[in-house]
Image: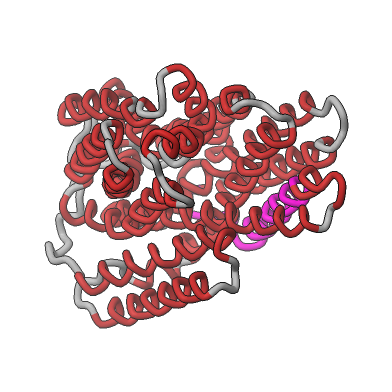
Amino acid sequence: MVLEGGGSAGRKTFALVLLCSASFVAVLDLTIVAIALPSVRRELGFSGGDAQWVLTGYALSFGGLLLLMGRVGDLYGRRRLFMAGLAVFGGASLLGGLAWAPWVLVGARLLQGVGGAALVPASLALVAATFAEGEERNRAIGVYGAMAGVGFVSGMVLGGVVTEFLGWRWVLFVNVPVALAVLALAPVAIQESKDDAAPRTMDLAGAATATLGLASLIYAVSEAPKNGWASPATLGTAGLGAVLLGLFVAAERRASAPLVPLPILRRRAVAVPNAAVVLKSMIGAAQLYVLTLYFQDALGRTPLEAGLLFIPMTVASVVASPVAGRLTTRLGAGRTAAWGFGISGAGLVLVASRMAHEDALPAVLLGMAVAEAGFVTASVPLTIAATEGVGDDEQGLASGVLSTTTELGNALGWAVVAAVITAATAASGANALLGGLRWGLWSAIAFAVLALTLVVVFMRPGSRETARSSANVTEP
C-alpha cells in the first residue's frame, strides 16, 4: 500500500494534473456527444430513435460497472486499473471517431463506458491515496471536483464548437491525445496503491448481479420519459434491476470475500453523503436539461450559440471548486454542503422567476452561474465526506459507490425533469414551453431543498473529516 501523502509536492501536483485530465475527458463524454447527435444521425444513417443508443450505451456500461471497478482497483491496483481503463477509453474513442456504421459507433460507446467506469473511481481513489487527509486532500479534491464539474458542463460548450468547425467525429478523436499523454506519464508520476491485505479472489456472483442490476435500473430510469413511467418496458426493466440488486445483497451476505462488504453501506458517514450526492446530481442534470431546451427551443439559438452560453457556468465551476475545498477544511463537510445547496437553490429561483420575461437572458446567465457555484460548493465536501468515511484500503470501493450514486442521480434528474416538463407543457396553453421549463426548474429547486434538509439534519458537525481537517489548518 502506498503511504498516504507520500512523495514530493511537485510530483503530487503533477499526478493530480494527470488524474484530473483523465477524469475530465471521461465526464466530458457524458454530454459532449449529445450535442453532436443530430449530425451523427444524419451521417451514419441511424433509423428512428436508434441514435439514442449512442448516449444510452455509454451510460449503461459506465454506470453499471462503476461499483465493480472501484473494488477491482482496491484488490489489484488502482494505478493499474486507471491505466487499463484509460487505454480502453482512448482506443474506443478512436474506433468511434472512425465508425463507418451505426453498430460500430454504439459498440465503441459501450467500450468507452467500460474504460470510463475503470478510470473514474480509480482516479479519485488515487487522489485520496496521494494526498494526506485534511487540508492537503481537501484542496486536491477541490481541484479534482472542478475538473469533473467543468468536464460535465464543457461538454455542452465544446460539443457545439467542435461539431460546427471540425465535425462530429472530433468529439471522439479529442480524447485520444489526452489518453496517450497521460498513459505515457502516469508510470512516472503516479504511485501504485491497493489493499495488500485483501484476498485476491473476485466475488463473481456479486459482480454479475450488481453490474446487471445497476445497468437495468439506469436503463429503466433513462428511458422512462420516452417509454412512459408505467409502460411494460419501464416497469419490467426496473423490476428486473430490483430483483438483481436483491440477489446481490443476498450473495454479499453469504460471500467469504464480498465485492461490497454491506456494513460499509450502512455507515452513516457513507450513506448520508451518498444520498445527498444523488440529490445533488439530480439538481445538476435537471438544470442542464432545462437550460439546453431554453437556449435552443425557447430562444432559437443554434447548438454552437447555446454551447457558448454555458461558459458562465464553466467559469463559476472553476472559481468555486478550490474555494469549496478551503471552506470544507474550515467549516466541515456538512456546513459547506448546506451553504452550497442554499446558494444553488437561490440561483435556480432567480432563473425560474425571470425566464418568462422579455430580455431575461442576462438574469438567466447570472442565475445559472450562481447555481453552478453552489452546486460545486456542495459537491466538493460531499466527495470528501463520502471517501473519508472508509479506511485507506477501501478507497476504490468508496469512489465506486460515489460514482455510482452520481450516475444514478444524473439519470433520475434527467428522467424526472423531462416528465415534469412534458406534463406541464401539455397543460400550459399558449406559453407551453416556457411554462414547462419553469416547472422543470422548480423541481430542481425542490431537490435542492431536500438535499439541504438532509445535510443539515443528518451530517454531523463533528464528523471525522471535519475534525481531522481542522487539525491541519494553520490559522493566519
Q: Is residue 387 visible?
A: no
The quarter of the displayed image where residue 99 is located: top left
Q: Residue furthest top?
A: 165
Residue 113 drawn at (x, y percent): 32, 47
Residue 73 drawn at (x, y percent): 23, 51
Residue 54 or residue 344, whichever sits in front = 54
Residue 224 or residue 417, whichever sits in front = 224
The stretch of residues the image draws in magenta is: 437-465
Q: Is residue 33 visible?
A: yes
Residue located 49% across and 36% down the image: 38
How is the rendered protein coloured?
Answer: secondary structure
Residue 385 drawn at (x, y percent): 48, 51
Position of 8 with respect to 314 (left or right) is left
Compared with 453, 7 (above or below) is: above
Compared with 196, 148 (above or below) is: above
Residue located 77% across and 24% down the image: 362
